[in-house]
């Protein structure tokens, strides 16, 4: 099985994510199931009303980490195709910040691969979110990606 | 050698990217300390950040080499 | 928390399922995540090329069982809204037979509720699928819904 | 009293729905046997089907009552 198949779509975009077209993109004739995750901007955060968000990324590394996720789920689960698209820049309430769609012959693999993809994206892909409120702005609490403890042991 | 800062680290030092020469054999921790001397507030974030070398997460004791792209990364919050 | 909220959408339809509109339907301002399951017609079954499918249902009971699923996931998981739509009649390869979308403030609940909904639908909702091949047709293998073992013990 | 058949059971007996009188106190198993007498092939499916009474899955020893809606249901294959 190839590590990443041609049809996978891994992108960072600055305009609205076209979720319906991604659902069509991953759909294959041999498939029976697509599981999709749509993450979008909530209207509040820790009880404060959100006005809007700004996302930034270390773009080439973020794409590299998204590709690692795609490679891993192709190896680990019996899936056909995956789309992972993250939006950057200014986002309003309700707008999709990340969309993941996974197609597979059977639903179990699609569910597990989609869940793995979003959980891992949130831990390892270098993207940052700043939340703007009526009375200020904060960088969202995030997760520290796992790193090798020492270059000596890692090499 | 390119050094990049993101998120709150970028805001703190007011610079997203610096290009320049750094002595080889320096570790990533030592590179960070050079910046922390110029921007003392940076030191507070030392335990809540990670570092990458050539777009891979790296250990702080990794030694740099010519042409490296180094980035200092706060906790990620995509999704 | 109400058992089934007004906005839930539980339907049996005979035309193409409008999946994008269901994604919009479940989306709320307090939500941050939607997990969707799109089940569609595979081009083969047990190695035989499928030409098309016919679905039939015991319609009022099927809707009742779909409502039980919705009620259960509202009680069990912190979700906002669910849509479960199943198509009946003639379906071509690639057409969506069932679409489930679950919105929630956080993704874990949406994933688990969506998975529960499709797994339970396949076990308890009285719908039947007949597969038409070039050389004949068969009723798909299915699952026997769990039933009370005895009226005496059940009452 | 209404009796419904679905899927392969409907095809087998050639009828989707029958309305009529059945003696009260009959169990669902006995209702099935009446049909199996008229359609002997039906008996082969007795262990791979379930029965519902008033749109709820029911035990085979459930006694029927006037106005009941009974349905014989093969393994379900929706989704």
Image (spheres, coloured by chain):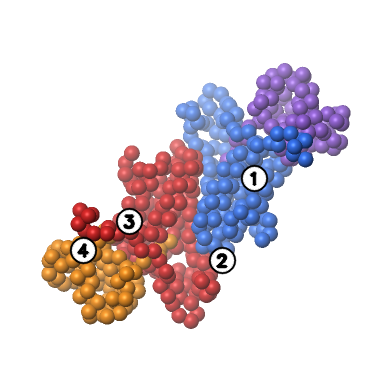
Chain colours: A red, B orange, C blue, D purple
* Circle 2 residue: C30
Find residue A130 and report its image quarter. Answer: bottom left
Mark 4 chain:
B
Q: Residue at x 61, y 47 (%)?
A: C85
Mark 2 chain:
C
Label 2 environment density (alpha carbons within 10 Å; few <14, some 14–19, many ≥20): some
Between disc 1 and disc 4, the foreground one is 4
Q: Is residue C139 above or below residue A117?
A: above
* Residue B2 in picture, x, y percent from top left: 20, 68
Label 1 environment density (alpha carbons within 10 Å; few <14, some 14–19, many ≥20): some
* Residue A152 in picture, x, y percent from top left: 20, 57
Mark 4 to mark 3 CA distance (whole Å): 22 Å
Q: Does the image show residue B63?
A: yes
> SS at mark 3?
helix
Mark 3 chain:
A
Tell me if label 4 and label 2 are in contact, CB under 8 Å: no
> SS at mark 2?
loop
* Circle 3 residue: A65
Tell me if label 1 and label 2 are in contact, CB under 8 Å: no
The N terminus of chain D, quarter of image: top right
Mark 1 to mark 2 CA distance (whole Å): 29 Å
Along the line of sight, which residue is nearer the eye, B26 or A138? B26
Mark 3 to mark 2 CA distance (whole Å): 29 Å
Mark 1 to mark 4 CA distance (whole Å): 62 Å
Q: Which numbered dot is residue C13?
A: 1
Between disc 1 and disc 2, the foreground one is 2
* Circle 4 residue: B61
Q: Residue at x 69, y 25 (%)?
A: D46
Label 3 environment density (alpha carbons within 10 Å; few <14, some 14–19, many ≥20): many
Along the line of sight, which residue is nearer the eye, A96 or D33? D33
């Amino acid at each position: 099985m190839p590590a990443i198949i041609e049809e996978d779509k891994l992108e960072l975009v600055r305009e609205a994510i076209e979720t319906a077209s991604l659902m069509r993109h991953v759909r294959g004739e041999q498939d029976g199931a697509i599981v999709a995750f749509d993450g979008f901007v909530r209207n509040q955060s820790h009880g404060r009303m959100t006005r809007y968000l700004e996302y930034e990324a270390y773009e080439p590394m973020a794409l590299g980490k998204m590709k690692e996720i795609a490679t891993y789920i192709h190896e680990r689960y019996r899936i056909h195709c995956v789309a992972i698209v993250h939006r950057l820049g200014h986002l309003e309430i309700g707008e999709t910040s990340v969309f993941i769609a996974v197609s597979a012959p059977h639903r179990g693999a699609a569910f597990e691969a989609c869940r793995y993809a979003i959980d891992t994206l949130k831990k390892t892909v270098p993207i940052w979110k700043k939340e703007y409120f009526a009375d200020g702005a904060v960088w969202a609490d995030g997760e520290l990606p796992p790193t090798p403890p020492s270059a000596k042991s890692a090499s | 050698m390119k050094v990049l800062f993101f998120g709150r680290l970028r805001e703190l030092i007011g610079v997203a990217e610096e290009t320049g020469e750094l002595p080889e054999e320096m570790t990533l921790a030592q590179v960070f300390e050079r910046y922390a001397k110029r921007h003392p507030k940076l030191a507070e974030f030392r335990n809540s950040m990670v570092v990458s070398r050539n777009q891979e997460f790296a250990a702080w004791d990794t030694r740099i080499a010519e042409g490296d792209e180094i980035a200092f990364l706060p906790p990620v919050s995509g999704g």
